[in-house]
Amino acid sequence: MKLKNLILFSLLWIAGSPIQAWAEVRPAMPTHSTDKYGCEWQWLRGGGIGFWAENCKLATGNWHVDWESALPGFALWHDDDRVATVLQIFRKPPGASIDTVLPELKSRHYVPDVADCQFKPVNIRPAPRTIAFYDIRPEGERLKDFEWAPKDQVPDPPCGEYGWSTHGIRYFISDLRQPELILYVNEGQDGTMIEPGSIVFE
């Protein structure tokens, strides 16, 4: 290869590499929408994660997802009213089990300070092999009490606000490529304006 062509090839490769890397990190924008006239998709980033979320200006008000450094993570807002935490980032030593996050969850009163609420692997959706999903489920007597609850009532989540529930989808994600991060995801019962399948650890 002539020197001129070699230099041109090198420049093109260098110029294209960041674009290719960014395309691998940032999934394509979703094609569905809550309201095709009132909603638009936005790529949001913070705390080492990225994802697509809708910003909807509807007759009911402005529904949007914003970063909150106090979590750290993202919350769903309706106009100026905070609705719910939708994503929250927790940190652990890179080689440690996800169970090391439990003390922080208990200290922040997201789950009860008991021994019979534990992380369990779950199958949420297809994902790369580096990714694992978990939720917090009851064991022992707590599970028995929950199973004996009246079927005609909506039961409280047996393991607290961030635990498994019969109403709403809540879980945690780990990724071997970012071993120090654990991500809490709240999809709610009717959605929380995020596209969960677009979440990436950057």
Image (cartoon, rainbow, N blue to C red):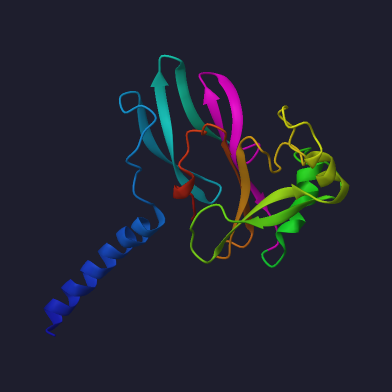
Does residue 75 belong to the magenta stretch?
A: yes
Q: Is residue 136 left or right of residue 31?
A: right
Rendered location of residue 182, percent (x, y):
63, 53
Chief SS of the magenta region: strand
Q: Does the rendering let one see residue 96?
A: yes
Does residue 84 belong to the magenta stretch?
A: yes
Magenta region: 69-93
Rendered location of residue 38, percent (x, y):
35, 23
Above or below 70: residue 37 = above
Identified at 71% across, 43% down, the residue is 163
Q: Is residue 77 left or right of residue 150?
A: left
Rendered location of residue 177, percent (x, y):
54, 65
Identified at 63% across, 47% down, the residue is 171
Nearer-the-camera pick, 74 or 116: 116
Q: Is residue 67 left or right of residue 152?
A: left
Residue that protrudes farthest toward the top in the picture: 59
Quadrant housing residue 162: top right
Nearer-the-camera pick, 86 or 42: 86
Rendered location of residue 17, percent (x, y):
31, 65
Identified at 45% across, 20% down, the residue is 62
